[in-house]
Image (spheres, rainbow, N blue to C red):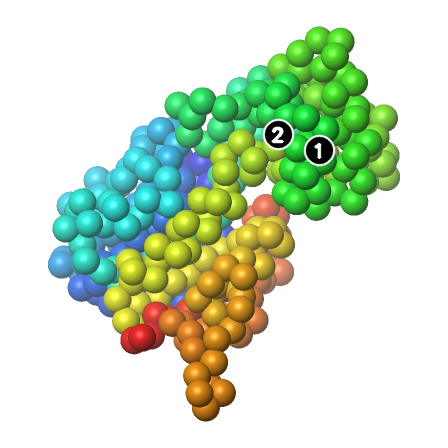
Amino acid sequence: MDSQSYHIPALLPEALNALDIKPEGTYVDATFGGGGHSRAILGCLGERGRLLAFDQDIDAKANALPDSRFTFVYANFRHISNFLRYHGISHADGILADLGVSFHHFDDAARGFSFRADAPLDMRMNQSAPRTAADIIEQYDRQQLIKTLAAFGDLKRPAPIADAIISAREKGPLQTTGQLLEAVARCVNPRQEKKELAQIFQALRIEVNGEMDALEQFLKSTLAALRPGGRLAIITYHSLEDRMVKNFMKSGNIGGEVEKDFFGHVKTPWKQITRSPIVPSEAETARNPRSRSAKLRAAERVQE
């Protein structure tokens, strides 16, 4: 599969610059996808450089790069520490994660990520995972649905949507994206239809894949995975992710609680490389509209 049709990497030059790649270093692309970021990283590495790339979607494995310096790891990036040890790596020099959903997932109607085509309500990144979006729609009670829609979709009025889903499923199972759209149609503001539908689908996708839990585990693992002086660069696409990454790079913990020493100096395992997030240029968003919500943050691991 053409990597550009699978996914166009966002903020590519900016991400490479944030990683400050050393030719003989060891790097991790935690979200391989179409391999765009990985190809660019390999282009900066010398003969003794090394790159490990993670992806939990078996479709991404077809994009694996034929390079002796490259290792594809078929796993969720939350398991980064285990697999680095398995491959004999004590510490990496840089870790990159692009948290965006690949074009491939939205464009492959059968995967159920998009509301633009009628398809099974699946939304699993890992197609061998047991729970689909249809399972959530069928099994969650009213409060669970409201919590999911509010927390992961940032919907201002999640209750009517939850009620509409429950009402519709009482008449028969909701198994397809089309059935879900029909169920919630009367609750969606016509003037913001695309935005609100995207929020509903985002909430279900995040819940299906446990994305926020996986991100939290991944972030915590980077503390041990990076050597002092190593760089962490993360591209986020919605406020939940960005807030978690921002807090972590500021304080070393997910909540963002800052610890100070006796003299009032902030104690943190990170030196921030980007005080404010880097966003795509107008030229990039014109070339790749799906990059418009991307934000890059980077930090350097410091000696504790």
Crowd tier of the residue under label 2, counting other residues whose Cα lies within 10 Å: few below 14, some 14–19, many 20 or above: many
Task: Please determine whether, in this image, residue 229 is positioned above or below residue 214.
Answer: below
Residue at position x 41%, y 49% in the image: 217
**Residue tagged 2:** 114
Quarter of the figure that contains the N terminus: top left
Residue farthest to the top?
A: 172
Give the class, few, some or many, for how many residues have Cα within 10 Å of label 1's Cα (few <14, many ≥20).
Answer: few
Q: Determine whether, in the image, residue 104 is placed left or right of residue 162.
A: left
Q: Nearer the viewer, residue 179 or 193?
A: 179
Residue 148: which quarter of the image?
top right
Label 1 residue SS: helix
Residue 239 rendering spot, x and y as whole percentages: 62, 54
Residue 270 can be seen, yes or no: yes
Closer-to-camera residue (239/109): 239
Q: Residue furthest front?
A: 262
Relative placement, left or right, of 183 versus 219 is right
Label 1, label 2: how many angstroms apart (C-alpha)?
A: 25 Å
Left/right placement of residue 119 relative to residue 4 reads: right
Q: Amino acid at mark 2?
A: Ser
Percent x, y of residue 255: 54, 61
* Mark 1 / mark 2, whichever is N-terminal: 2
Q: Badge 1 is on which residue?
A: 143
